[in-house]
Image: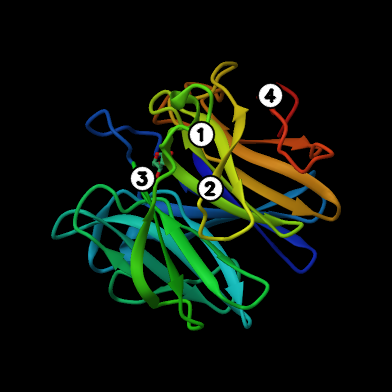
Amino acid sequence: YTADPAPMVYGDTLYLYVTHDEDELLNDFYTMYDWHCFSTKDMVNWTNHGKIFSLDDISWAEDRAWAPQCVERNGKFYLYCPVHKKDGGMAIAVGVSESPTGPFKDLGYPLVDEGDWNYIDPTVFIDDDGQAYIYWGNPKLYYSKLNDDMISLNGDIQVTDLSHGFAPNEEESKYTEGPRIHKRNNKYYMLYASHGVPEKLSYSVRDSPTGPWTWGGVIMDQGNGTAFTNHPGLIEVKGRSFLFYHNQKNVSGGGYSRSTAVEEFTWNADGSIPFIKSTDNGV
Ligand code: FUB
């Protein structure tokens, strides 16, 4: 079972980084030890690269190999991964590699480390001016600039409040977790899991990478086998647009036995993201 999809395009290839729900569930909670990668050039034929990074590679981590994202800079690949530390709390590890499929080497220490539950689900991007940003968190959205080395913060950690009711119904826009930043036509789209649990997918939009954000709308609601969590992985590749997410539709699937899925979509003419149905036709 795979979840929390984070696609990345490098060259002519789409790499999909995912978490891994173990077949055997322990303590009736997420049982997740490693991250896997798949790649494709055509969205039809996929290569399974298997396990590309794991808790065993992070000496200071003990559990919860949760939602990652990989980005490339100057020929190096940086895999940002939330983990539970041996001395308690969640933090974000960074694995560095010369190749998109690893092996990734841990820094040896957390990039961000608050010592509690909130520091999960990093999303990272490099703006056109070269400035990199990292965003993360549940139930608040934190962010910081990254230095060019991609492994150190540039400045203080900031909090963006995405929960202050831009939508007609405040619950509609409530940020929960799983952010994914995407830039298109000079607009910054912040996609995220919303509404608390069970989660929908929503987005906010702005002409600055640091907000303040304006409510965009719901992208995917619950139903048709979605799990109580969901996770948006929006990507544009070769002139096509895709939303990766996860559901519980695989054999014996459930909230802790999830599967990655994808829907192709077309942007609305005004640049908004359409409502995207979880279908039975996707991968
Ligand atoms: O997969 C573990 C956690 O569940 C992720 O970090 C969250 O986004 C949610 O999907």
Frontmost of labels 4 and 2 is 2
Disc 4 from disc 3: Cα separation: 28 Å
Of labels 4 and 1, earlier in sequence is 1
Image marks 1 and 2: residues in contact by CB distance under 8 Å: yes
Mark 3: C-beta under 8 Å from nearest atom of ligand 1: yes
Of labels 1 and 3, earlier in sequence is 3
Frontmost of labels 1 and 3 is 1
Figure quadrant, ligand 1:
top left
Residue located at (51% from left, 34% from top): 166
Identity of the amino acid at label 3? Met
Q: How is the image coloured?
A: rainbow
For the image, the number of numbered tags is: 4
**Which circle marks residue 92 in the picture?**
none
Residue located at (55% from left, 50% from top): 180
At label 2, counting other C-alpha atoms closer than 10 Å, the crowd grade (few under 14, some 14-19, many 20 or more) is many
63 is higher (above) or lower (below) than 144: above
**Which circle marks residue 32 in the picture?**
3
Residue at label 4? Answer: 277
Q: Position of residue 96 (x, y in %)?
A: 47, 75
Helix, strand or loop at disc 1? loop
Q: Position of residue 32 (x, y in %)?
A: 36, 45
Of labels 3 and 2, earlier in sequence is 3
Disc 4 from disc 2: Cα separation: 24 Å
Residue located at (72% from left, 60% from top): 186
Residue located at (44% from left, 63% from top): 80
Frontmost of labels 4 and 3 is 4
At label 1, counting other C-alpha atoms closer than 10 Å, the crowd grade (few under 14, some 14-19, many 20 or more) is some
Which picture quadrant has residue 71?
bottom right
